[in-house]
Amino acid sequence: MAALFTTPKRNDTTAGTHVAEPDVRRRIGLAHGSWRRVTRRIVVGAVCALTASSLLMPSVSLAAEWVKVGETKYNAGTAAGDETGTWSWDGADDLKLNNYNGGEIQAAGKLNVNYSGNNIVTADWIEGIKASHGKNENAELNIQGNAGSTLSVTSTEDAILSTGNINIDGAGSVNATSAGFDAIDAEGDLAIKGSGNVNATGVSDGIRANGNITIDDSGAVTARATKDKGIGTDKNLTIKGGGTVEASSADGEAIWSGGNINISDGSQVKASSEKDAAVEAKGSLAATNASLNANGVEYGVYAHKGITLDHANVTVRASKGRYGGAIALFTYQDDIVVKNGSTVDAFAESEVSAAFSTRNDRPNEEGGHIYISDSVVKAIARYVENGDGPIPYSENQDGETSPEPQGENIGIIAQTSEGVTPAVISIIRSKVTAEGDTAAIFARAMSADGKTIGTIKIENAAIQTPEGGKVIDYRKLRDGIYEAGQAIGTGDAVIDSPYNEAVAKSMVIAPPEVAKPEDPKPDETKPAESKPAESKQNPKPEGSKPTKAVAASITKAKTTGVLAATGDTSGAAIVATVLAGTAAIAAGTMASRKRS
């Protein structure tokens, strides 16, 4: 088991070993970035004081100090343009393009590029469109186009670059292609807004920023990278606006954030990488009222500080990485939370694999828990997809068998160590299908005294398969450290290995049958209350009370055995069932810890 659950380090040789080193960029931009948010408030409105201070350091950008179009440079204060009207500059901060087809566009300070028609910018050995810090003005690049208009920028360097912020807005289409570096690069913040489309293809990054990236776009954003990240930001990534975002990389993460990733507002995100994680966040990842499709190598989604899926539709795949491991959904130092009608399909395939995995071995960090409520989850971990799984025992040259199993493949696993908060897997009013060639579901805690135990808690749901399935205990002393936890399986004995035959390799947990309510009497407006069944494996959470809406749906539920009527209830039906009492459910409590 240890191979899946050691402390992750970038250069380890196990599946849980992916903590990336800081991203080393060829442009750090610290000197310019330190001035980027400098503002001044003059209490006494002395014009001379304002002028003097502006000469000492870059101020809030007001206009371009100069503009270069093609081979010609134009200084501020004098309007310029070409005779055919394909471009014009007002001498300050506005540059208009109308069916422009020419060389690079450069500026010092703030530049607003407004385009209409079909515009083409081509540059060799220099950036296609660039705004850089001037002597007195910060760099700021704003690009806006009308519906039906396009701006296509191609360069052997960065296609679009600002040493400050970049804002892309409007209903037009921006196409940026770099044959050598990044397609779109902001050394400050980057914002894509409006209803237009943005297509960015880079040999290095597709879209990147030293600051925050915000995509608030109802159109489509596509970012492709050959050697680095499809979308990468050193700070936070926010995707909203209800549009589609597609990121891919041939050799790096499709989406990478040095902070948090937040996806919401009906947005649809697709991320795929051929050699690395599809999505990685040094902070947390949250998908709320949104969809996420991630297909990666070694990791599908890896968020160091927790994963929250709230009314989200998520599909995640992870294939074998360079160190022989694969985890579809993984967090280190925090929890995985799936709630409010989410639908999650997670699959991982490798010698060492897990569909859901959370781990914590740091006493000062929370984490090591998986909470699933009012949702539908499918979690499958395979040694080989569509195969018969690993060979249970290996054979040596003399034909003798060795009692060492091949592979570690667990559908859902939570683990803590060093005596920190016990690992917990909590399933509430949800349908959960879990499969693993080693075990379907497993919770484990490691401690020196053996008092910390990983637990599986099931509330207002029942084990459908295996028949006679229940929560069984696990305990083992390994190298002076106690491992204590639980799994789903059969039998009454305490197991000492996840490979034990009593451990279920396939498991289905689902809410009980919803009884058809009787017609209420004229003076009745609420269904009668009833209590959910309790058992040793399904204890009533301390301090929690079943709400009326949930209690009314419980009919002779048991933690063990097979549901009498519903059988393999469809995901849609389960979601409809568990959301029937939305108002009441919202007031419910988690089994071991209230989650917001």
Image (cartoon, rainbow, N blue to C red):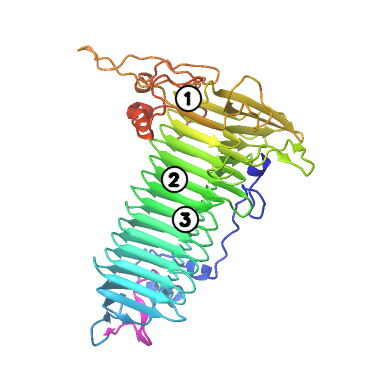
Outermost residue, right direction? 398
Q: Indicate the quadrant where residue 495 lies.
A: top right
Q: Amino acid at mark 3?
A: Ser
Magenta stretch bounds: 58-81
Residue 272, label in figure: 3
Of the numbered discs 1 and 3, the one sitting upstream in the chain is 3
Q: CA distance from mark 3 to mark 2?
A: 12 Å
- Mark 1 or 3, which is nearer the eye? 1
The answer to whether the residue labelled 3 contacts the one labelled 2, judged by CB atoms less than 8 Å apart, is no
The residue nearer to you, when weighing 193 against 464, is 464
Placement of 382 over or under 92, stated as above or below: above
The residue nearer to you, when weighing 226 against 176, is 226
Q: Indicate the quadrant where residue 5 lies.
A: top right
Question: Pointer 1: what residue?
Answer: 464
- Mark 1 or 2, which is nearer the eye? 1
Quarter in which the C terminus is drawn: top left
Numbered circles on residues, count? 3
Residue at the spot x=67%, y=51% of the render? 13
What element does badge 3 sit on?
A: strand
What element does badge 1 sit on?
A: strand
Q: CA distance from mark 1 to mark 3?
A: 34 Å
Residue 64 is a magenta residue: yes
Residue at the spot x=48%, y=33% of the render? 433
Q: Amino acid at mark 1?
A: Gln
Of the numbered discs 1 and 2, the one sitting upstream in the chain is 2
Q: Position of residue 80 (x, y in %)?
A: 28, 85
Q: Position of residue 445 (x, y in %)?
A: 64, 33
Residue 179 is a magenta residue: no
Q: Position of residue 509 (x, y in %)?
A: 47, 28
Residue 315, label in figure: 2
Residue at the spot x=44%, y=23% of the render? 460
